[in-house]
Amino acid sequence: MISAEAPIVLEKACELFIMELTLRSWNAALETKHKVMQKSDVANAISKSEMYDCNLYIVIYSLD
């Protein structure tokens, strides 16, 4: 069982994670002069930050 506050906290954490990763990916897209964000931009954003190392293998295998 979990407390009633736990889903709210988890929801906010997921929201912040997605927002941060999206902003980093958008910056990567702008650096490569893409008009539309692509998988490679997300991969570049993840590879440039140690904070996302846990997600690096997931992204690498999904690009294949």
Image (cartoon, helix red, strand yellow):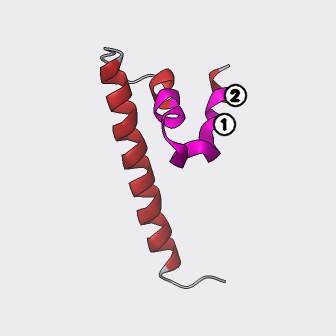
Q: Which residues are magenta?
A: 43-61
Residue neighbourhood size for the residue with mark 2, other residues' Cα within 10 Å, grouped as few (<14), some (14–19), many (≥20): few
Q: Which residue is mark 2?
A: 61
Quarter of image, res 36 = top left
Q: Position of residue 31 (x, y in %)?
A: 32, 20
**Disc sitting over residue 58 in the figure:** 1
Above or below, 17 relative to 48 = below
Above or below, 60 relative to 5 = above
Q: Position of residue 60 (x, y in %)?
A: 65, 28
Number of callouts in the render?
A: 2
Dot 1 falls on a residue whose secondary structure is helix
Dot 2 falls on a residue whose secondary structure is helix
**Disc sitting over residue 44 in the figure:** none
- Residue 57 lies in magenta, yes or no? yes
Measure how far apart labels 2 and 1 are at the Cα level: 5 Å
Q: Residue furthest top?
A: 33
Q: Residue at x 44, y 72 (%)?
A: 8
Which quadrant of the rendered structure holds the C terminus? top right
Tag 1: amino acid = Ile
Left or right? Give the position of 55 relative to 25: right
Tag 2: amino acid = Tyr
